[in-house]
């Protein structure tokens, strides 16, 4: 059976897994810190030789232009055509990481989604978003196509969202949307307010311990995420719902004030716009390695 290599490159870690032609199962998942990989092509070559790989699908953080992704948070350029030729692969596909997450929904089970808000879907548009190292998002439309976005690098909402963190001025370090809505944002805003440098996971740990500054930062994050999702849901008329993904959010959602989230998602909307938001379900994707599954789903859709 022809073997398939699935890879996902995030801002911090690389994950890879195997599958086989015609299978929907992701097998033997591994995670490696990107900082430990000195040469990406050499690493790929070793995997291809070790597992006798026939085809490969890669998802990576960054916009795809003409089959090439220059990673947003890494000095790494990935070219699907060049990799196909270099390693003599039968097929080689390259996806934006949020494009991949969109494709992962096609075979997700109900038990893998935790509903934050119930709804009554009214079209096929589904919006995906996830704060991690940065802020990723994508839209899945009626024909099943997934359209990745770069909303994390937009700047229009940043100033107003800082108010949610009780920051009245607009410090120069907070410019893009992902500067105020991401795991990195949680860390940098906590440091800005307290002077203490700590990871986003560390802030969540302090939240569990009752730290008031951590509570304030996570409350600001909750409000900001809800307001961004509200704007995006109306922008794309996401009648099939909004789905939040990522390891950080799987941790935060356990402690997140969901009533506060829904309050800021609805905001001051009235009339038809209030009706639209009320109909849109919001769920948390609890599937690990969603990108790897999305890569495989995309492959299976495109080899027929």
Image: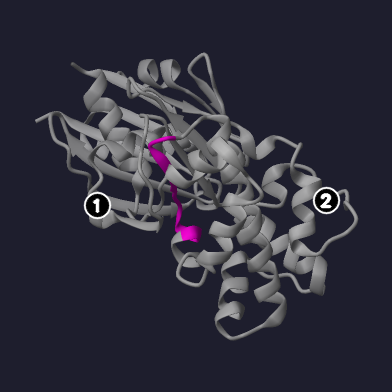
Q: Residue at x 50, y 72 (%)?
A: 255
x and y, in percent, of residue 91 in the image: 28, 19
Residue placed furthest toward the left: 1
Residue behind mark 2: 173
x and y, in percent, of residue 122 in the image: 37, 33
Q: Quadrant of residue 254?
A: bottom left
Residue placed furthest toward the front: 271
- Residue 283 located left or right of residue 75: left
Q: Nearer the viewer, mark 2 or mark 1?
A: 1
Comparing 204 with 115, the one in front is: 115
Comparing 136 with 11, the one in front is: 136
Residue behind mark 1: 110
x and y, in percent, of residue 66 in the image: 52, 13
The span shown in magenta is 239-249
* Quadrant showing the C terminus: top left
Q: Is residue 182 visible?
A: no
């Amino acid at each position: 059976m022809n073997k398939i290599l699935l890879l996902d490159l995030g801002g911090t870690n690389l994950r890879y897994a195997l599958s086989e032609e015609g299978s929907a199962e992701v097998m033997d998942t591994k995670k490696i810190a990107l900082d430990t990989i000195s040469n990406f092509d050499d690493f790929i070559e070793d995997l291809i030789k070790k597992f006798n790989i026939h085809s490969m699908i890669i998802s990576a953080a960054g916009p795809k232009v003409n089959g090439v992704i220059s990673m947003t948070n890494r000095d790494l350029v990935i070219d699907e055509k060049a990799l196909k030729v270099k390693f003599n692969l039968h097929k080689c596909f390259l996806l934006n990481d949020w494009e991949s997450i969109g494709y992962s929904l096609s075979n997700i089970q109900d038990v893998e989604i935790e509903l934050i808000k119930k709804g009554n879907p009214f079209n096929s548009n589904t919006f995906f978003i996830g704060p991690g190292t940065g802020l990723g998002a994508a839209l899945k439309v009626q024909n099943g196509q997934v359209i990745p976005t770069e909303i994390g690098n937009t700047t229009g909402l940043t100033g107003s969202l800082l108010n949610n963190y009780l920051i009245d001025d607009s410090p120069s370090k907070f410019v893009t949307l992902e500067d105020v809505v991401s795991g990195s944002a949680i860390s940098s805003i906590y440091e800005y307010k307290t002077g203490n440098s700590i990871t986003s996971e560390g802030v969540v740990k302090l939240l569990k311990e009752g730290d008031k500054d951590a509570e304030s930062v996570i409350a600001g994050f909750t409000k900001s995420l809800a307001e961004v999702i509200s704007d995006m849901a109306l922008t794309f008329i996401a009648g099939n719902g909004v789905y939040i993904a990522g390891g950080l959010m799987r941790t935060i959602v356990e402690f997140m004030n969901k009533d506060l989230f829904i309050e800021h998602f609805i905001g001051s909307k009235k009339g038809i716009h209030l009706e639209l938001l009320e109909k849109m379900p919001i769920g948390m994707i609890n599937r690990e390695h969603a990108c790897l599954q999305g890569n495989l789903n995309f492959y299976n859709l495109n080899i027929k």
